[in-house]
Each structure stands twice: as structure tokens, then as C-alpha cells.
Image (cartoon, rainbow, N blue to C red):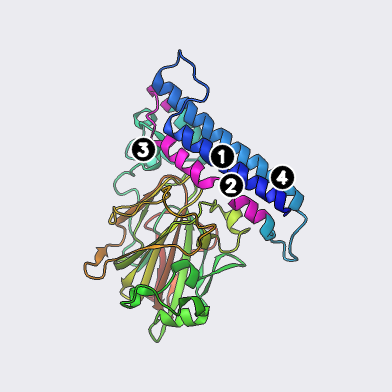
């Protein structure tokens, strides 16, 4: 990409971020005196968020076409276009969207606005505890809607169940520290989980930067007769937005990567290598009956926050975190080893404010078998895999 053009796009991105912050804080750019204050704020944030999102999309789609011919032989887009996508103010837009989600909707607008969302994303409102749309005060309440009792039954026969409603992007065995986010697009466990400080008393492994993926894989100390597996579950905007524990396990360590907020939709996942390594995520490491177990909630565009019920301290997508586009590899740890957290299978674990992704990486015996398929729609509590043979 031409340097002047790249510089101009960075400046435009900076201006967009300032505009989003001002809009979210309540500055009236185009005041109308006759409007009630609450209505002005509501219309302002809605319009500002939509305008900025639309401008970013148009800029990316049309200006980015000048690089559309620069593709590799296997059809993947080159770094130029990906870098242009990454400099968009997606984190600022996501914070504005998060504020908009918490605005109390006028009662008269709740049914038409939420009804439109239900129609667009095929939400299963009949499964919710509260089926009347006008009783949801804002979009955030609707995203976090609670399901009726027994609408999702937790499979007791299998050791591992689906952690959320969504789609299986990919699953399988982790080979030499490399796993797939979708078919043919790889990333490494080393960069996804970071230094293995949960296995030692040191604050940071001095050898981490020089470790190969194979050395990192051996450092996980998978038991003889076991293998390392993974599964990626994508939550679409219309899905139930709470996610649950996939197994009975113990949390020993938490690592928060304040990364980017790129979309994690299947189309983007097929386009950007290492997407889950770039994005903000909260990873929990521990053990289950077969050995190592990790559960990671990955952020995405317009996901204003990731909330973990057993760890109220973690705060995602906040302004004071460093910009990982320029300072990669930043993370924040919390050690639970002195007071580990015990989690039951099916227990509510956390929530997204919009669709996103859950990544499981775990150790299991060689006879472990998945009960899912790629691109399969799954529901929370359904069987994901088992070691038992019948």
C-alpha cells in the first residue's frame, strides 16, 4: 500500500475514534432544541454508530479494491488489505455500540426495534424466559436474555458438551502446537495462550520468544496416551449470548489479551490467518479429569464487553489498555492456584454483548471422539465429545 495513502487512512481512523468517543459521551453535534434530552441522546448515539460503521465499511470495501488484485496463489488476501481493515476504529465503534446497547429504549420503540432484530437474525424468542419484547429495557437486556428452565438439557453421558448455541467452525487434534481456526487457516497454541507461566512460579518464561511451536507443545506436558484437541464455536448475533462450562474442571490461571476487535464471522475467519491471536480474548487455564483444559472467550466487532461470572475483575475493551497493533504481545494475568475456581459442567460461565467465539483446547485420551461436524449448528449442553465406548 502507498505510504501517503496508508498515512491518510490512519489519520481518518484517528478522527473516527474521536468522533465516536464524543458521540458516546453525549456531545450533541447537531442539536434540536425541541427534542427531549433522552431522545436526543438515543438518536445521536444510534446515528453516530451507524454513520461511523457505514463509513468504515464503504472505505474498506471501495478503497480497498485498489489492492484486490494482490492475492496469493492460494486465494488469500495479502497483508495490505488486512492491515487496512485492522486500522479501522473498530474498538471505538464497539465501545459506542456497547453504550448504545445500555440506553433505555422508549416503550413505544421496543417492539418494532427488537422485532426487527429478531426478524433479521432469526432469534428464538419463544425459548426465552421473557417472551414479550416490550419488557426488555434495552438491546443489552435482550442479548443477555435468560432461557426457560430445561430448554437446554446438559448431556450427562459425555464428558464434554457444547458451551454455547452456535456453529462449529473447526475441531480436531492439535498437531505440534498448530491448530486450525477454519479449514486450511492455521494459528499456534503458543501465540494464542502465551507463556506457560501457569506451569511454573516464574512471572514470564525467558525462553518463550525463542520457543518453537513444537517445544511449546511439549511444555504443556500432555500425559502419555493422551492427545491435545481443540474446538471453535461461533456465536452468531441471533444466538443465545450466554456461554456455559463445557466440562467439570478447575481454573488455575487467567490471561487477558487486550487485542483487537475484528469480526470473527466465518467469512473473516477464512480470510485472516491467526484471527483469534489478533483479537481481544480472555483465556482460562486449568485441569479436568483427563489433564490440561483451557476455555477462551474471544471478543469481536461490536462486542462491547466480555463478562465472566466467576471473575468479576476482568474488564475488556477499555480505553486505557495499550493498542496491540503497535505493542503486540501485551497481556494481564491473574493466578488462582492458591484459591482455584471449581466449575461444573453446564454452569453459566459468561456472556457476550453480541455474537462472538469460544475456543476450547484440552487434553484427552487417544480414544476421544467428537460428536460434532464442521459448520454444524449446535445448542448449549448437547454432546460435543466423549472417551467412552459403547
Residues in magenta? 81-110
Relative placement, left or right, of 271 versus 329 is: right
Q: Report if the CB atoms under discs 3 and 2 are less than 8 Å apart.
A: no
Q: Going 56% across and 39% down the picture, which residue do you hit?
A: 16
The outermost residue toward the left is 339
Q: Going 21% across and 67% down the picture, which residue do you hit?
A: 339
Please state the horizontal and vertical placement of residue 291, each as a whole percent of the image.
Answer: 34, 77
Report the label total: 4
Q: Which residue is mark 4?
A: 63
- Camera-side mark, 2 or 1: 1
From the image, give the main secondary structure of the stretch colored magenta.
helix
Crowd tier of the residue under label 2, counting other residues whose Cα lies within 10 Å: few below 14, some 14–19, many 20 or above: many
- Visible residue check, residue 104: yes
Say whether disc 1 or disc 3 marks the residue closer to the N-terminus: 1
The outermost residue toward the right is 69
Cα distance, mark 2 to mark 4? 13 Å
Report helix, strand or loop for mark 4: helix
Cα distance, mark 1 to mark 3? 28 Å
Q: Going 54% across and 62% down the picture, which residue do you hit?
A: 374
Please state the horizontal and vertical placement of residue 96, each as a whole percent of the image.
Answer: 46, 38
Crowd tier of the residue under label 4, counting other residues whose Cα lies within 10 Å: few below 14, some 14–19, many 20 or above: some
Report helix, strand or loop for mark 3: helix
Q: Which residue is mark 3?
A: 141
Crowd tier of the residue under label 1, counting other residues whose Cα lies within 10 Å: few below 14, some 14–19, many 20 or above: many
Report helix, strand or loop for mark 1: helix
Say whether disc 3 or disc 2 marks the residue closer to the N-terminus: 2
- Visible residue check, residue 118: no
* Magenta stretch encompasses residue 333: no
Q: Which residue is mark 2?
A: 88
Q: Which residue is mark 1?
A: 16
Cα distance, mark 3 to mark 2? 28 Å
Amino acid at each position: 500500500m502507498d505510504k501517503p495513502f496508508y498515512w491518510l487512512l490512519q489519520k481518518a481512523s484517528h478522527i473516527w475514534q474521536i468522533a465516536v468517543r464524543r458521540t458516546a459521551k453525549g456531545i450533541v453535534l447537531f442539536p434540536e432544541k425541541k427534542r427531549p434530552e433522552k431522545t436526543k441522546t438515543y438518536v445521536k448515539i444510534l446515528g453516530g454508530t451507524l454513520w461511523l460503521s457505514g463509513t468504515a465499511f464503504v472505505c474498506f470495501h471501495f478503497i480497498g479494491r485498489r489492492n484486490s488484485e494482490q492475492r496469493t496463489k492460494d486465494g488469500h488476501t495479502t497483508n495490505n488489505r488486512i492491515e487496512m481493515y485492522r486500522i479501522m476504529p473498530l474498538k471505538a465503534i464497539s465501545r459506542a455500540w456497547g453504550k448504545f446497547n445500555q440506553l433505555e429504549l422508549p416503550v413505544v420503540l421496543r417492539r418494532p426495534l427488537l422485532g426487527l432484530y429478531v426478524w433479521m437474525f432469526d432469534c428464538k424468542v419463544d425459548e426465552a424466559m421473557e417472551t414479550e419484547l416490550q419488557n426488555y429495557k434495552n438491546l443489552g437486556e435482550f442479548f443477555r436474555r435468560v432461557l426457560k428452565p430445561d430448554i437446554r438439557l446438559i448431556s450427562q453421558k459425555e464428558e464434554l458438551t457444547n458451551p454455547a448455541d452456535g456453529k462449529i467452525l473447526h475441531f480436531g487434534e492439535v498437531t505440534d502446537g498448530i491448530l486450525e481456526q477454519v479449514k486450511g487457516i492455521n494459528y499456534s497454541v503458543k501465540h494464542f495462550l502465551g507463556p506457560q507461566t501457569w506451569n511454573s512460579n516464574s512471572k514470564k518464561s525467558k525462553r518463550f520468544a525463542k520457543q518453537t511451536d513444537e517445544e511449546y507443545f511439549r511444555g504443556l506436558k500432555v500425559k502419555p496416551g493422551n492427545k491435545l484437541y481443540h474446538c471453535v464455536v461461533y456465536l452468531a448475533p441471533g444466538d443465545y449470548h450466554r456461554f456455559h462450562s463445557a466440562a467439570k474442571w478447575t481454573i488455575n490461571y487467567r490471561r487477558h489479551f487486550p487485542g483487537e476487535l475484528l469480526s470473527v464471522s466465518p467469512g473473516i475467519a477464512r480470510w485472516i490467518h491467526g484471527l483469534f491471536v489478533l483479537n481481544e480474548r480472555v483465556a482460562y487455564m486449568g485441569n479436568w479429569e483427563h489433564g490440561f483444559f483451557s476455555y477462551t472467550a474471544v471478543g469481536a466487532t461490536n462486542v462491547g464487553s466480555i463478562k465472566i461470572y466467576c471473575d468479576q475483575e476482568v474488564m475488556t475493551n477499555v480505553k486505557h489498555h495499550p493498542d496491540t497493533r503497535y505493542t503486540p504481545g501485551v497481556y494481564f494475568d491473574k493466578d488462582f492456584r492458591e484459591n482455584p475456581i471449581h466449575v461444573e459442567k453446564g454452569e453459566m460461565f459468561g456472556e457476550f454483548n453480541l455474537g462472538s467465539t469460544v475456543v476450547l483446547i484440552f487434553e484427552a485420551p487417544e480414544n476421544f471422539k467428537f460428536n460434532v461436524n464442521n459448520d454444524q449448528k449446535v445448542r448449549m449442553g448437547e454432546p460435543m465429545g466423549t472417551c467412552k465406548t459403547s
